[in-house]
Image (cartoon, grey):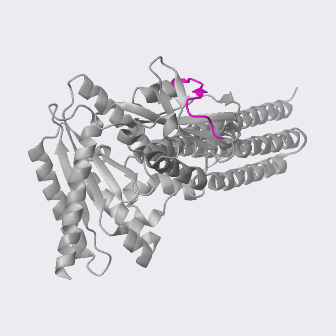
Amino acid sequence: MDRKQTNVKTSIRNFILALILLLTTNVLMGVILVKISKDALRTQIEARMLDVSNTAAAQIDGEVLKNIKAEHKNSADYNRTLDILRSFQDNIELDYIYGVNPEPDGTFTFTIDPDREDPAEFGESIETTEALLNAAKGKSDVDKGAHSDEWGRFYSAYSPIFDDDGKVVGIIGVDFSAEWYENKLNANRSVAVIVTLVAMTIGIVLSFVIMSQNRKRFTEMLNRLEDLDNLTQKLDKQIMEGSIKRLEMLPESESHLLKTLAQGEAIEEHSVNEYEAVNSSIEKVYDKLRYYAKYVESRVEYDDTTGVRNKVSYRSRVKEIDEQISSGKAVLSAAFLDINGLKKIYTHHGFEAGERLLYECARMLKHVFGKESVYHVTGDEFIILADKKQSWEMKDLFAEFEKELEKYNEEHIHENLLSVAKGFVTFDPEKHRNYRQLFVEVKAACDKDKEEYYARKTAEI
């Protein structure tokens, strides 16, 4: 066998090995992409379910609810509670919402059911689940698996209702169709399958080209690899559409990852031969997957608009604080902030103007209190959970924050000015038996500051 024949066989073998590596990389990319997207989406869906049940539970008066019995049907208190639940039933994307009563023997029964067609009877037994047991202990939770009853197959979220003494007197249950939940989780699977099938199809075609053609055909393989990379970028863009916030609001140091995902990373190519070109293409696919995985993981705990921690992180931190309080190890201060007049700015100046103020407020809070201490929970409100901070330290930090506000408003005097109502409370083990009591006090302090702000505005007019 002469040298030329040996080189041809070696070339074919190396090409096939490169092709196998390429196919393996793309298959792994599809599998990992499905897992990362599914886990992130599961967290978001469960957070939305808990948002609905928590909001409904917060609107129910525990002192009234604990006195409602079956014979009180059509009473003023009964109808008032029924109307609250019915407003959620009619206006929120859910299947059922209802009240649950934890019985002394450890079982659970229905209370008020606003369903117009087939409501559960007051006192009728309900299936006990782990999430329902956790709600009876004072902790909102979501079923990890679907359950079936006479109304269908559902995933449910449960939130406790407390009386003035902090005792659980009832539970709000919200049912979501299992089909809806599972369809949401599987939404991105088809995209990953398409990517994998496209990669495999191109790979099979390339294998025949490699074994039957010369260097010209090998060049065509590289062109197809480039087409595959472009197709993957297009699919990535479809997956992330609506998730990447406007890049112009971010400084260069914070936007590098998002710009890399949206535009691709510039890579200097110095391929000496076809083998290096193949290796370079595989590395591009791998790097893109790595950046996308990092992005998806970061979105689970951080808010898109503001860049600070989101509801998922907040709930996790609240759980830690309650555990610290129970063990006598809690040392922290909490602050609540509410941007004044943001709804008016949304109405008169547009969504982007309001979002700009949200972002700038978050930027200043991160600079003063640290990124890990700031939470954007909802709308125009921020919460700060400052570990190991005493009252005098919080006063100093808020003084620094006020300076940041003044500086920003001086620099943007011809734009929408930023005004923030705020209040803070330092944890006191004599007053606060749990985080909820600390939160109620700090929220009241912020509300008082907001009332004083609008009173001054009215007096100036």
Residue 58 seen in the current view: yes
> Does the magenta-highlighted stretch encompass residue 121?
yes
Residue 265 seen in the current view: no
As rendered, which of 364 and 456 lies closer to the eye? 456
Predominant SS along the magenta part: loop
* Numbered label tally: 0
Identify the residue at the far left of this view: 392
Identify the residue at the far front of this view: 71
Going 60% across and 39% down the picture, which residue do you hit? 175
Looking at the image, residue 86 lies above or below residue 459: above
Q: Is residue 263 left or right of residue 56?
A: right
Q: Position of residue 18 (x, y in %)?
A: 73, 35
- The stretch of residues the image draws in magenta is 119-130
As rendered, which of 63 and 394 lies closer to the eye? 63
On the rendered image, what quadrant is the C terminus found in? bottom left
Q: Position of residue 385 (x, y in %)?
A: 26, 42
Q: Position of residue 16 (x, y in %)?
A: 79, 33
As rendered, which of 70 and 201 lies closer to the eye? 70
Going 72% across and 53% down the picture, which residue do you hit? 231
> Does the magenta-highlighted stretch encompass residue 59?
no
Q: Position of residue 314 (x, y in %)?
A: 37, 41
On the rendered image, what quadrant is the N terminus found in? top right
Looking at the image, residue 348 lies above or below residue 447: below
Q: Is residue 149 left or right of residue 58?
A: right
Going 88% across and 40% down the picture, which residue do you hit? 208
As rendered, which of 307 and 98 lies closer to the eye? 98
Looking at the image, residue 220 lies above or below residue 348: above
Looking at the image, residue 317 lies above or below residue 415: above
Identify the residue at the far right of this view: 212
